[in-house]
Image: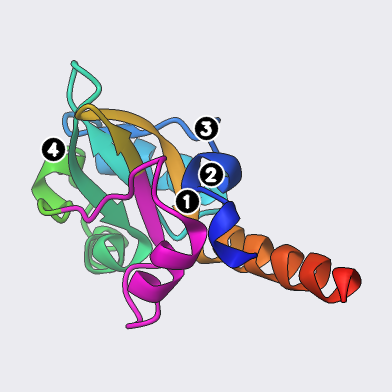
Amino acid sequence: MFDQKFVADVMDASVVPLKAGMGLTQAVSHLVESRYPGLPVVNDENVVVGFLSEHDCLRYLISSSYYVDERVQVGDVMFRQALTASPKETALNLAERMEGGKPKIYPVVEGGKYLGVVSRKHVMRALRDALTHSKALV
């Protein structure tokens, strides 16, 4: 059934997070290459300290087209209260939290440490597969 898949089963552990001291230009390049709408920001102990989304970057990108300021860092722009998911949380439970509209991607954290990310697409795929599997059993 739906609750048999856990976040740990569907998350992407290969996503490299951003650092607060990283320049925004470098972070935007990393964000674009990641194909995610946002990425977690971690400190040197691999603890999530924020989240940087495409939306957060737009104002700075627009203004920098006229005046490039390399002093702007991820820590200046990021959202500081990142919502997180546990690897032990069910995909169904996370889907219910995502239903409200935000966010579309969650950092996955265990024991305070960053493990990866889980997106709506990951959760939708898990729920679709569970639904397909349950229909096949009927």
Image quarter for residue 95? bottom left
Q: Earlier in the sequence, mark 2 or mark 1?
A: 2
Please identify the quadrant where the C terminus is shown: bottom right
Colour setting:
rainbow
Circles 1, 4 touching at the beta carbon (< 8 Å): no
Instruction: Inspect the magenta stretch and tell me whether residue 105 lies in it.
Output: yes
Q: Is residue 15 left or right of residue 71?
A: right
Image quarter for residue 134? bottom right
Q: Distance between the Cα atoms at labels 1 and 4?
A: 31 Å
Q: Is residue 98 among the parts visible in the rendering?
A: yes
Please identify the quadrant where the N terminus is shown: bottom right
Q: Secondary structure at mark 3?
A: loop
Q: Residue at x 21, y 56 (%)?
A: 67
**Residue type marked 4:** Arg
Q: Distance between the Cα atoms at labels 3 and 4?
A: 30 Å
Disc 2: which residue: 11
Circles 3, 2 touching at the beta carbon (< 8 Å): yes
Instruction: Inspect the magenta stretch and tell me whether residue 122 lies in it.
Output: no
Q: Which disc is residue 13 wearing?
A: 3
**Residue type marked 2:** Met
Q: Is residue 55 above or below residue 26?
A: below
Q: Secondary structure at mark 2?
A: loop
Disc 4: which residue: 71
Q: Nearer the viewer, residue 49 or 69?
A: 49
Image spot of residue 27 (x, y percent): 35, 40
Disc 1: which residue: 118
Q: Earlier in the sequence, mark 2 or mark 4?
A: 2
Q: Nearer the viewer, residue 92 or 125?
A: 92
Q: Earlier in the sequence, mark 3 or mark 4?
A: 3
